[in-house]
Amino acid sequence: VNTLIKSSLFLGLFFAGIALVQAEPPADVRSGEKQGLDSQIQDLKREVLQLNRDLFLLEEDLLFPSSTQFSVFVSLDSGKLFSLESIQVRIDDKVVANHLYTEREVDALKRGGVQRLYMGNISSGKHEIVAFLSGQGPSKRDFRPGATLNFDKSAGPQAVELKINDNSAREQPEFTIKVWE
Amino acid sequence: MIAMPSFAKIDSIRTLIISVLLSSLCVSAIAETEREEEVLDLNYGLTLYHLFQDKYFSAITDLLIAKKRKPIVAQGNSPELLLGGLLLDYGIEQDASTIFNRLLDEHAPPAIRDRSWFHLSQIQYKAGNLSAARGNLNRIGETLSEYRNAERLHLLSNIYIEQQQYDEAMSTLQLIPKKSIFVAYTQFNIGVTLIKENRLDDGVALLQSLIKNEATTEELAALHDKAYIAIGSAFMRVEQYQKAAEQFKKVRLNSPQSDIGLLGLGWAYYKQSLYEKALIPWLELNSSLVISPAMQESLLVAPHTFELVELPQQAVSHYSKALATYDRQLADIREIITAINKNELLRSITPTTNIGEEKPFFHYRAELPESIATKYLMELMASQEFQHAIKNYQELHYLQGLLQHWEENLPTYTLMIEERRQRYTQKSPLIKDSAQLKQVAQYEILQKQFSAEVAQGISSNNILSLASTEERELLEILRSVREKLDRLSGKEDVSEQQKKYELLYGLLYWQISADAIPRQWQLQKGLKELGDALTKAKDLEQSLQQAWIDAPRRFNGFAAQIKEKSIKVRALLQQTARLKAEQGMQINALALTAIERYRVINTKNQSHATFALARLYDTLKKTEDK
């Protein structure tokens, strides 16, 4: 019995040794077969990425030709004075986008990300874009700012950026629309 | 050590596995991308939006699209560096490596070069090319962030460890800022290695300096637990059992290492012949809900110890309990094997997101399957190999969904092209004969006439040509008055009317001539605007006509592209399904191997317990007979 128990002890300590090694950073020791599978997966990922890119471009060319393409982007400065909850966008009095934000999305915006809220088609010439926001302003009060812009859609692809900035001097959020060519 | 409920313990183990994996094994190549630079290009901002939601596939796609459509130039080398980092994290190391090498060839600014060298060395380290990795880590300048630089030194010390240059590893450790988490990991790695290399005093001293610092996070607490076990095991090896017990005692009961701590503590007492004390941790371990080799071992050593302290009835009871537990576990194991073979494990790790919806990158690694096998697979779950396999499987599942999305959508696009083609055929004659299009040419003629008139008016100093419509009407009235006066002249006395006419004409002439310069300017401006509008209209007409001419070729181009991409989508879908099946088989094999290990230990322990119980009954019988 003692021999049995001694060998069991050895097993226990051996197990401990295995556990210790796991705290080291990846040395990535894998068998040839597993490496082969990994390498095939790596190749597949590369091919899917390329195909996905091509299909996105194809889709864009097909659905949103450059002459009529129009996009709406949203950016948030620091977001300290305004906690964004939702946005509605109307172009020529027609609702084209409604978005309810998750915490993750707001965080991504606060860190400098820019969201593409809408992509669609409009004709060249004069248009009006109106955006309504809702969220909480300073002192956690409900805040529903809005902005309007009359713009001339050019012959090429065009985008506008709905910018939400903190105006620390006025202690108020500011909401502007910038046109990108 | 403080006892806590076993369910809570399983949960904490789960959390710890996740936290340890996240912090020590999965340090992201782009993790430190923070709001450091102004976004000057919407597409770069869009990439960051996906990146900050850990949607790496989408972020890579954004950059690839921008690269092909309209390269992001306003952000310098940042997009390229970001793409390299994303590809590295996404597991496409070859492409990442190409990007970093290109950035180095292009003589990028020092900060970009340093980051490129760093990421290249990560790739080289992973590929086992230690010398190259070391070379690159050593040539990095001073532009890395404090966190990244600590990570660099940690990686460098690991290379020294693997190259058995322990003094260099120690010197590198001294360079890591004291408050960095990497100090603890480096101390741990060097300490454990030195113990393994029989440099017990050095190793223990290093691990003790690690645990001397307060464990401010769960991650550090877990590392401390591992360090206690390593020191305890080292003392056991040199038969310093009391010192070993002191270390094992410090392992927290809610730690993933608690089973080893309890087993080790029991053995440290046992070796000092403190059998009753040894029973306390082993009996605690007996009731653990998490199944581990240590727990299985405790089931056997506890009754054996009861025998030693001459409590045979207790020994019988615990051998019987051990046998019952082994039986139950073997039944569990059989069920689990059946469940794994029926792909239950794979189903439980398959993401529940909608088809083609990307899950945040780190979620792939963090989610543990809720399966009956979980309590047997804890150790396997924490292994990098298993996590990697799960991540691969889940990524393949996402790719499969994405390709299915395209497979479903592409026929719609084909239909769309066909409809456009039909509309084109129907409308073609109407467009050719469009009166509106012909109007542009007529307007152009008119514009030329106006220009000529204005030019002539200006050159001949014809002030009246600048008259407004109203003034022209008045001039017309005055002209007819003049005619009438001329007719009446000699027949009647019209001198009074003649004076009035001259006065009115003079006034009107004066009004026009006084305003002549602004009028000329206005007229020329109007003509220019008309000219511009006509040029624009002509351009539009031409581009419309060109588009109309090009339309059949464009339709054919789209159709051909869709056909070609559809073939590719189908081929990649097949390939994805095959690789997903292979990866699934590998996951099942890993799980079955882990379960089999328990089955073998269990069966062995079961026969030992059966034998010990029989022997004990025999002894008791003999005692009774006497």
Image (cartoon, rainbow, N blue to C red):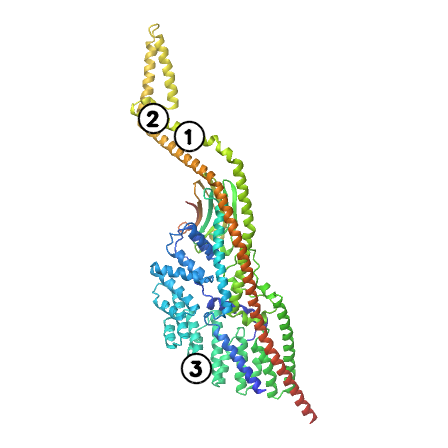
User: Which one is nearer the viewer's eye here, A134 or A160?
Assistant: A160
Q: CA distance from mark 1 to mark 3?
A: 96 Å
Q: Looking at the image, which is closer to me, B240 or B197?
A: B197
Any mark on residue B200, and which?
Answer: 3
Q: Work out whether B485 lies above or below A176.
A: above
Quarter containing the C terminus of chain B: bottom right
Q: Is residue B480 above or below residue A35?
A: above
Q: Is residue B281 left or right of residue B104?
A: right
Query: In this orientation, which residue lies closer to the viewer: B3 or B305?
Result: B305
Q: Quadrant of residue B595?
A: bottom right
Tell me whether circle 1 and circle 3 mark residues in contact (CB < 8 Å). no
Badge 2: residue crowd in 10 Å (few <14, some 14–19, many ≥20): some
Amino acid on which the number 2 mark rests in the picture: Val
Residue B103 lies in what quarter of the image?
bottom left
Mark before the other along the chain sequence, 2 or 1: 1
Provide the residue designation for mark 1.
B441
**Whole-Å distance between the Cαs marked 3 and 2?**
104 Å
| Residue identifier under label 2 | B454
Residue B77 in picture, x, y percent from top left: 37, 56
Q: How many marks?
A: 3
Residue type at numbered disc 1: Ala
Going from N to C along the chain, the mark reached first, 1 or 3, is 3
The answer to whether B404 appears left or right of B614 in the picture is left
* Parent chain of label 1: B
Residue A69 can be seen in this image = yes
In terms of depth relative to the viewer, which is nearer, B265 or B48?
A: B48
Residue A43, image x, y percentages = 48, 61
Q: What's the residue at 53%, 38% (across, down)?
A: B423
- Give the chain letter at badge 2: B
Q: Secondary structure at mark 3?
A: helix
